[in-house]
Image (spheres, coloured by chain):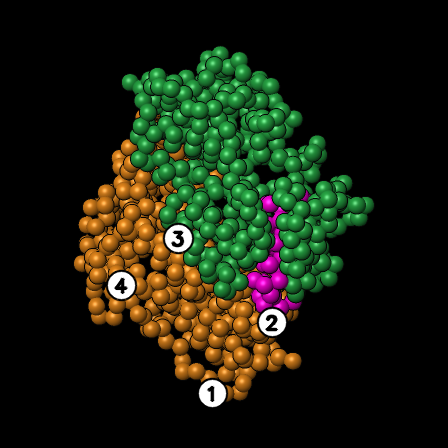
Chain colours: A green, B orange
């Protein structure tokens, strides 16, 4: 009989790291996720832009835990947590009792108090989002080729991206490349190279989390790819297939939203204090104050280090997950607890098109092809299984030489 | 100005072969398809069973026609043909006038006069079908793991396949392999190797189009993989998640239908005579009698050779498409017409699991590993572009050694 039961909600970077840290421990681990796969989110924009296939960046979570006999995976949707009865409620299955609970449900996009914008703007968080965006992008060009109305063609082939963080920058660069290079010779009635890609950022520069010279480089690189970069451009409205930005209305075929994020509703489940973005406020040990054995990690947690909240990045979730797993294990086994958690920042990277990127690694600042090479290698290494690494490598190599995109699939006009 | 306009409906094996045969000819070619990709249907069951990704067997039709400047591709749905006005009507776009019309819309499954069975039985013709079946298969195991009711587990992990032609045999063998090998160590609460896979065939043997010894071998191989083969088993009803066969009701997690096919409604569009399966009756030159410049090829055409209708196979469509393209070209260019069409039968193959197949190639009859090797090589060669060949090869090699499946993706419980 195991010495307790750890329930982990969410099989992203944080949840999976927590589960793995408990491998071989004398506990029952139950990992619950809404999907059956662990998603490598940093490359999700490549699925949305038809460069990679879904299976290249998603691995069945079961295969990742195949050799961890104390771990059970349940595919289900958590609807509530009963901290009095110490159990988690599922939409399509029986309650799951816990001794320890780790919430790792991540974040979703938020529209700054304008939920109605969601009807006209796409977000990129899940595999379903990515496939939806891929359909809309490919579908916009198909509808344009079908049309004999120049105004409709202009509207359909205008793409607006709101928010110039890494996801916005990477997506804008890739769409511009797709229009100007991949699709260049593929249409007869429209000219895809005339497509407009507009990147709007409310702040004064793109990639605000990077240094100013790197932001300047990124903006130049985007402009060279044909992206119209508009900084200091606050979006005022998104409706009827268009945006209003700086007083100007732009009709668009697709609007992508990559601005604000909002934690998923774990704080509500617990009735625990939440930060402004909805994240569960946790202490130095990732525990929720006043709740026995309840932890929150990654994007769903608001964790202060040196009085500043940690950013919503994969490495934060992964490091916190591993640390909480080791903490629970130490307590169960009656061994000394690990040294207090401290996030170790390895740096940040963003890629702009086929051969350019910006990177901050430790004290190093890189741009251009060298940064792109570093980005490619780091991301290939971080992919969780060897099969993914192999197929992503094949696809990238192929795309690099041919400027093609292997996953241009559209089953019906969106 | 081109010397006429050829409209081709359907970008499958037949339509694509026709378009390619017109490369460089002084005509405008308009190819219309409901999807944006050319699908390699013979491997569709591998997408349905999570072995391959959609992009591995589907190539954007635009890239295939990129270097054929006289060809325009339109993604759209044909709703009618007006033979008097000589134009094709589209659901989402303007009419397309034609001088020559080639109908290559293929076939869909039919339920032998029981359209209501479609609610409880899945068919495998399009990429959407394959992804739907993949979700249902993976979802059945996920739901079973979530359940604490043994009866529900038994029902969810019972799979019934109706019709033992190549698609039925290949799918049944692959599902059995997936349950017994791939998923073997991936669940904690259920035992996937206890899943039942039942293949029902109304006729006296599986693979009726093959020789009797090959059918006998296939049945043995299926049984060894754990498939329950029931020949002489007519399905009497499909309803409420189960089938009635030979008087017995079987509750199933998924029912797959691979029995009768029915041509898509081109004959209705034309008001032309149709065969019993709805196919357009065509003459020796694939032309529709009494209609100027209208041809039908592949599964949508009923073509008699030596007084027997040609089967609904990819090579028939491909050979007819190429021939009709050459015929139109000769007429336009005022050159001698090609020799009368005659289907050349290269043989047939069906694969049963990881290392076994049956093949008839010319006078040769093969079974077992040799047949499987031949099958693999032929199918790799037939894949239309080099990138697909490479990724399919990588995935097959990977799967062969690991017994894994790379594309086990499920975004929500079906």
* Residue A35 - label: none
* Residue B98 - label: 2
Tell me which corner region of the image, top left, top right, bottom left or bottom right, holds residue A87: top left
Label located before the other in sequence (4 or 2): 2
Crowd class of label 3 (few under 14; some 14 to 19; many from 20; radius 10 Å) = some
Residue at image coords 29%, 57%: B350
Q: Which residue position holds label 4?
A: B374
Q: Chain of mark 3?
A: A
Alpha carbon separation for disc pair 2 and 3: 46 Å
Q: Which label lies toward us, 4 or 2?
A: 4
State which quarter of the image contains the N terminus of chain B: bottom right
* Residue B112 horizontal/vertical position (percent): 40, 50
Crowd class of label 2 (few under 14; some 14 to 19; many from 20; radius 10 Å) = many
Residue at image coords 49%, 60%: A399
Callout 3 secondary element: helix
Q: Which residue position holds label 3?
A: A390
Q: Residue furthest bottom?
A: B335
Q: Which residue position holds label 1?
A: B336
Tag 2 and tag 3 share a subunit = no
């Amino acid at each position: 009989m195991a010495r307790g039961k750890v329930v982990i909600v969410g099989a992203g970077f944080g949840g999976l790291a927590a589960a793995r840290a408990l491998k071989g421990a004398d506990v029952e681990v139950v990992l619950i996720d809404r999907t059956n796969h662990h998603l490598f989110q940093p490359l999700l924009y490549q699925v949305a832009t038809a460069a990679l296939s879904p299976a290249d960046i998603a691995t069945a979570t079961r295969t990742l835990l195949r050799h961890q006999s104390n771990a059970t995976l349940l595919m289900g949707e958590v609807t509530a947590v009963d901290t009095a009865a110490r159990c988690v409620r599922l939409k399509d299955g029986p309650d799951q009792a816990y001794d320890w609970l780790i919430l790792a449900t991540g974040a979703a996009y938020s529209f700054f108090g304008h939920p109605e914008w969601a009807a006209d703007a796409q977000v990129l968080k899940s595999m379903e989002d990515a496939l939806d965006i891929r359909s809309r992008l490919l579908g916009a060009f198909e509808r344009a080729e079908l049309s004999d109305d120049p105004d409709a063609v202009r509207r359909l082939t205008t793409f607006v991206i709101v928010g110039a963080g890494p996801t916005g920058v990477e997506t804008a660069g890739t769409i511009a490349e797709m229009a100007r290079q991949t699709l260049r010779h593929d249409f007869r009635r429209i000219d895809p190279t005339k497509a407009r890609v507009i990147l709007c950022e409310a702040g004064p520069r793109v990639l605000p989390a990077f240094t100013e010279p790197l932001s300047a480089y990124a903006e130049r690189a985007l402009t060279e790819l044909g992206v119209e970069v508009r900084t200091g451009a606050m979006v005022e409205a998104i409706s009827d297939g268009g945006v209003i930005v700086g007083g100007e209305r732009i009709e668009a075929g697709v609007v992508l939203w990559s601005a604000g994020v909002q934690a998923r509703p774990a704080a509500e489940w617990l009735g625990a204090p939440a930060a402004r973005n909805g994240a569960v406020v946790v202490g130095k040990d990732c525990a929720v104050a006043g709740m026995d054995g309840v932890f929150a990690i990654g994007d769903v947690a608001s964790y202060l280090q040196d009085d500043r909240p940690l950013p919503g990045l994969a490495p934060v979730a992964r490091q916190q997950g591993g640390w909480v797993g080791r903490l629970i294990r130490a307590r169960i086994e009656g061994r000394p607890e690990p040294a207090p958690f401290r996030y170790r920042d390895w740096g940040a990277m963003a890629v702009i098109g086929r051969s350019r990127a910006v990177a901050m690694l430790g004290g190093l600042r890189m741009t251009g092809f060298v940064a792109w090479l570093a980005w490619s290698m780091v991301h290939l290494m971080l992919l969780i299984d060897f099969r993914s690494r192999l197929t992503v490598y094949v696809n990238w190599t192929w795309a690099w030489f041919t400027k093609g995109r292997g996953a241009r699939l559209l089953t019906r006009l969106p």
